[in-house]
C-alpha cells in the first residue's frame, strides 16, 4: 500500500465506527451490510454476546481513515446462519476437537448474498482484500477458534477467499429477473400456459377470500404496521424455531433508520391485518426477508412474498427479486435457481483435508442439482 502502514483493529460494536465511513466501504447496493442495519441488529439485542453473536468486526484504517471493514461475529453455536455446518461440528467434536467458538463473516439471520469484504471503492481491492483475510485468520488464532466461515458471498469476495486458500462451498437460491417487463401481465406472458393459469388461479383465490394487500414504505410505515408485522413474525418463529431471532426493538430501529429502504407488503381482511412480508430495497434489487400470518389463507404466502414483490419490482424498474433461502416451489413462480457461495478456513489441517474432499463431492452434487432444477423453468422456450 505504497509503503504506508495501515492498522487492523477489532470493533465490538458497529456503533464505534462512523456510519458514513462504514457505508462508503459497504456501498449502496445491498442494504444488509449498511451500518444502519447492523446497528439495528446489535442495538436491539438481536445479535449480541448474549445471543451467541459477539461482534468482532475487523476494521482497516490508515491515519484515521477507514479503508475496509468486515462484519464478523464470534459464535458459540450455528443457528441463524442458513449455511449449515451442524454436521461439521458433530464430526469435529466426535474426533476430540472443540468446534466452538468459531468466527462467522456474515449478516446475522440474513441469507442474502452480498459483499463481506467491504472495501472503499476508490482503493485497490487486490491489495486490501488479502490484508483483511489475513486479519480474519489472525483473529481466529487469537480466539482459539476452530474455523472462520464467510457465507453468502458476492462473487468477487468468493474469488478473494479461494485465492487465499480457503475452502469453497456452493448452494442454491431462487431469484426472479426482470426481463424488461412493463407490467405483471408481461411477465405472465413469458410463462408457459399452464404456469400462467396456475398463478392467475392462486391470485384469484386470495382476492376471493376477501384479502386486500397493500405495500407501504418510507414515511407511510407507522408503529401500528410494525406491531402487526411483529405478530406475523412471531407466528412464523414460534412454528419454525420456538423463539424469534429478532427482537421487537429491531423492527423499531429498522423503521427509525432505514424506512426508505423498507417495503412492507401487508394483507388485510375485514379491517384487520392478517399477514405480511418484509422486504428491503437495494439499488437494483428487492430483497424478501421475513414473512408471517395469523390466519391461514390458501396462496397468501405466494401472493405476498412472490407476486406482489414482482409487481413492485416491475413498477419501480428493479432488476431482480431475491426471495431468501430454500424453496423449489419458487421455480414455477418465476424464481430460477442461482449459485450461492461461501468460503471456510479451518485451523486443524487434518479436519481441513477431510472437509476439502467432502466439499469437492458436495460441489459436484450441487452443480448437478442446479442443472436439474434449471430444466424446471416455467418460461416458454
Image: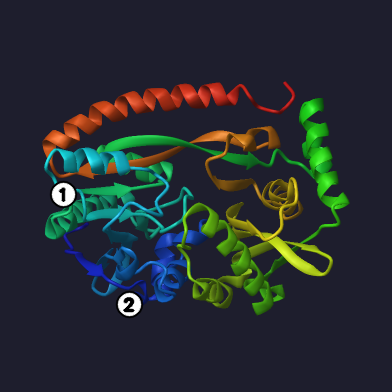
Residue 70 visible at all: no
On screen, residue 9 above or below 179: below
Provide residue 341's location: percent of width, then percent of height.
Answer: 40, 39
Out of 100 and 372, give the one closest to the viewer: 100
Q: Secondary structure at mark 2?
A: helix
Label drawn at residue 16: 2
Out of 345 and 126, give the one closest to the viewer: 345
Say which residue appears at 37% left-offset and 43% top-offset.
84
Say which residue appears at 41% left-offset and 23% top-offset.
365
Quadrant of the drawing holding the N terminus: bottom left
The first of marks 1 and 2 along the sequence is: 2
Provide residue 140's location: percent of width, then percent of height.
Answer: 18, 55
Say which residue appears at 20% left-offset and 64% top-offset.
6
Q: Which residue is mark 1?
A: 98
Residue 362 appears in which quarter of the rendering? top left
Say which residue appears at 72% left-offset and 55% top-offset.
316
On screen, residue 236 above or below 195: below
Provide residue 17's location: percent of width, then percent of height.
Answer: 34, 74
Residue 131 appears in which quarter of the rendering? bottom left
Amino acid at each position: 500500500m505504497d509503503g504506508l502502514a495501515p492498522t487492523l483493529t477489532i470493533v465490538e460494536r458497529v456503533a464505534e465506527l462512523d456510519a458514513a465511513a462504514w457505508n462508503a466501504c459497504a456501498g449502496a447496493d445491498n442494504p444488509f451490510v449498511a451500518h444502519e442495519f447492523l446497528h439495528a441488529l446489535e442495538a436491539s439485542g438481536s445479535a449480541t454476546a448474549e445471543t451467541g453473536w459477539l461482534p468482532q468486526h475487523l476494521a482497516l484504517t490508515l491515519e484515521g481513515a477507514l479503508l475496509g471493514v468486515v462484519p464478523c461475529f464470534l459464535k458459540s453455536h450455528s443457528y441463524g446462519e442458513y449455511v449449515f455446518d451442524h454436521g461439521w461440528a458433530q464430526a469435529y467434536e466426535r474426533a476430540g476437537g472443540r468446534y466452538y467458538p468459531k468466527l462467522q463473516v456474515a449478516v446475522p439471520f440474513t441469507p442474502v448474498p452480498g459483499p463481506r469484504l467491504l472495501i472503499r471503492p476508490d482503493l485497490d481491492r487486490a491489495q486490501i482484500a488479502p490484508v483483511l483475510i489475513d486479519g480474519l485468520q489472525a483473529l481466529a488464532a487469537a480466539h482459539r477458534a476452530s474455523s472462520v466461515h464467510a457465507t453468502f458471498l458476492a462473487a468477487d469476495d468468493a474469488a478473494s477467499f479461494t485465492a487465499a486458500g480457503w475452502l469453497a462451498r456452493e448452494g442454491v437460491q431462487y431469484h426472479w429477473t426482470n426481463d424488461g417487463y412493463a407490467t405483471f401481465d408481461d411477465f405472465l406472458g413469458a410463462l408457459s400456459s399452464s404456469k400462467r393459469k396456475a398463478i392467475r388461479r392462486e391470485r384469484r383465490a386470495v382476492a376471493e377470500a376477501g384479502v386486500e394487500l397493500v405495500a407501504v414504505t418510507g414515511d407511510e410505515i407507522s408503529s401500528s404496521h410494525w406491531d402487526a408485522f411483529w405478530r406475523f413474525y412471531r407466528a412464523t418463529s414460534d412454528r419454525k424455531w420456538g423463539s424469534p431471532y429478532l427482537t421487537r426493538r429491531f423492527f423499531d430501529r429498522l423503521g427509525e433508520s432505514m424506512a426508505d429502504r423498507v417495503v412492507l407488503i401487508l394483507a388485510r381482511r375485514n379491517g384487520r391485518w392478517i399477514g405480511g412480508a418484509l422486504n428491503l430495497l437495494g439499488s437494483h434489487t428487492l430483497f424478501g426477508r421475513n414473512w408471517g400470518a395469523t390466519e391461514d389463507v390458501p396462496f397468501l404466502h405466494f401472493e405476498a412474498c412472490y407476486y406482489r414483490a414482482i409487481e413492485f419490482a416491475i413498477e419501480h424498474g428493479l432488476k431482480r427479486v431475491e426471495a431468501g433461502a430454500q424453496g423449489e416451489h419458487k421455480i414455477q413462480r418465476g424464481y430460477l435457481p442461482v449459485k450461492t457461495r461461501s468460503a471456510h478456513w479451518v485451523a486443524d489441517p487434518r479436519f481441513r483435508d477431510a472437509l476439502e474432499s467432502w466439499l469437492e463431492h458436495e460441489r459436484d452434487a450441487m452443480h448437478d442439482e442446479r442443472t436439474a432444477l434449471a430444466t424446471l423453468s416455467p418460461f416458454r422456450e
